[in-house]
Structures are given as C-alpha cells and as structure tokens.
Amino acid sequence: MAILDPWTLDFVSSSEEQTVRLGVRLGELLQPGDVVCLSGELGAGKTALARGVGRGWGTHVRVTSPTFVLVNEYPRLPDGRTLYHLDCYRLEGAGDVYTTGLEDVLAADHAVMIEWPERIAAWLPADHLWVSLEYVSETRRKLHITGVGERAQALVEEFKKSAFGV
Ligand SMILES: Nc1ncnc2c1ncn2[C@@H]1O[C@H](COP(=O)(O)OP(=O)(O)O)[C@@H](O)[C@H]1O
Ligand SMILES: [Mg+2]
C-alpha cells in the first residue's frame, strides 16, 4: 500500500477474494448519504468490490451486477436502510437520469455505489469516494481510492485504519 496523503490510497489486490474483503471493510463503514464511485473498464473488479461492500453493509443478498436493471437495492437488517447499486453503463445522457429514477436515488440520503460514474458526472454529489480499478494481470488489480469532500476524506481515513491498520 502506498500512502500519498491522508485521503488517498493505492493498493494492488492479488485476487478477487482480496478485492471482496477490501469491499467488506468499506461497507462496514458506509453510512446513509455516502456515495462510492467505482470506475474502471469491464472486468476491472467493480462488481467484486461492490459485492464486498454489500456484505459489509449487512445485506444478506449477494450483490450482483445491475447492468441490465440499472439499479439494485440491498436493505440491511435490522434497520432496513438501503444500499443502492447503480450501473450507468447503458445510460445515454442526462435525460436518462430522470426517466430511470436515478435522480431520486441520488437526491435522497441513501448509501449508493455507482459503476460507470463518468456517465452521470454532472449528477454526482460534491462529496463522494472515487475508486479507480485497473487491470494489471489476470489476478491482479490496482485500486486507487480517493475521498472528495469532507465526509469522503474522513471515510478514507477510517478505511485505511480498518483495512490496513494505519
Ligand atoms: N484481484 C482481483 N480483483 C477483482 N477481480 C478479479 C481480480 N483478479 C481477477 N479478477 C476477476 O476479474 C473479474 C472482475 O469482474 P467484475 O467484478 O464483474 O468487473 P466489473 O464490474 O468491473 O466489470 C472477475 O471475473 C474476477 O474473478
Ligand atoms: Mg460490473
């Protein structure tokens, strides 16, 4: 792990399971209102990380790719708070944000994970976590995590302590 500044983190995951475990750590810290952007090409590991976040959030349903449905919802026990998982790959433009109901999800105070966040850049809240995943080799992925805004920066700091003890 490389420490660039308190709210940035570079890490190379060497297996899908390791990426999932990192996601669990993040999901345990996530609060309603937190937005996690997952950026990277197809197969970069966005959904693998999201699966871990769902587990850490406390949902009992396995997180799968929402590519064809755009939005999946994961309520947790015991409080029923919902984690949303969006995949914006198929969105054409801002108009789709209205017609698909994504606007409502983003406007409310929900925990949200977003794959292909670049597609809805204008709609992202100012405060968000940005995670870039990059293919290195068949089993390795580079993760770059940065907090944008006060809450997201605090989240990265907590995440570093929880996942790496620093
Ligand atoms: N270190 C790693 N982290 C995450 N996924 C990995 C890793 N190494 C190999 N993989 C594989 O890469 C693929 C990632 O798929 P997925 O998470 O659906 O990507 P995306 O959502 O970015 O398209 C899976 O087939 C997974 O097994
Ligand atoms: Mg995916």
Image (cartoon, rainbow, N blue to C red):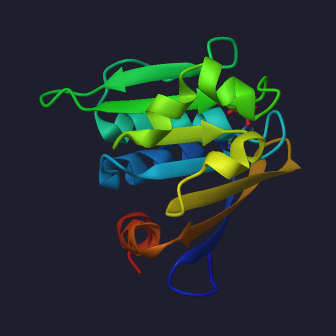
Q: In this view, does 126 lie above or below 64?
A: below
Could you tell me which quadrant the N terminus lies in? bottom right
The reply, left or right, for residue 40 in relation to residue 82 is: right
Question: 143 or 100: which is nearer to us?
Answer: 100
Question: 32 or 141: which is nearer to us?
Answer: 32
The answer, for residue 65, to whether it is visible in the render is no
Residue depicted at 33% across the width and 44% down the height: 109
Question: 78 or 45: which is nearer to us?
Answer: 78
Question: 21 or 99: which is nearer to us?
Answer: 99
Residue depicted at 70% across the width and 42% down the height: 120
Residue 158 percent across, percent down from the top left:
36, 70
Quarter-of-image position of residue 138: top right
Tell me which image quadrant ligand 1 sits in: top right
Q: How many labels does the image show?
A: 0
Residue depicted at 72% across the width and 56% down the height: 132
Residue depicted at 35% across the width and 51% down the height: 30
Residue 116 percent across, percent down from the top left:
73, 39
Residue 64 percent across, percent down from the top left:
56, 20
Q: Which residue ends up furthest to the bottom in the rendered image?
A: 5
Could you tell me which quadrant the C terminus lies in? bottom left
Q: Which residue ends up furthest to the top in the rendered image?
A: 68
Quarter-of-image position of residue 41: top right
Residue 159 percent across, percent down from the top left:
41, 66
The reply, left or right, for residue 82 in relation to residue 116 is: left
The answer, for residue 78, to whether it is visible in the render is yes
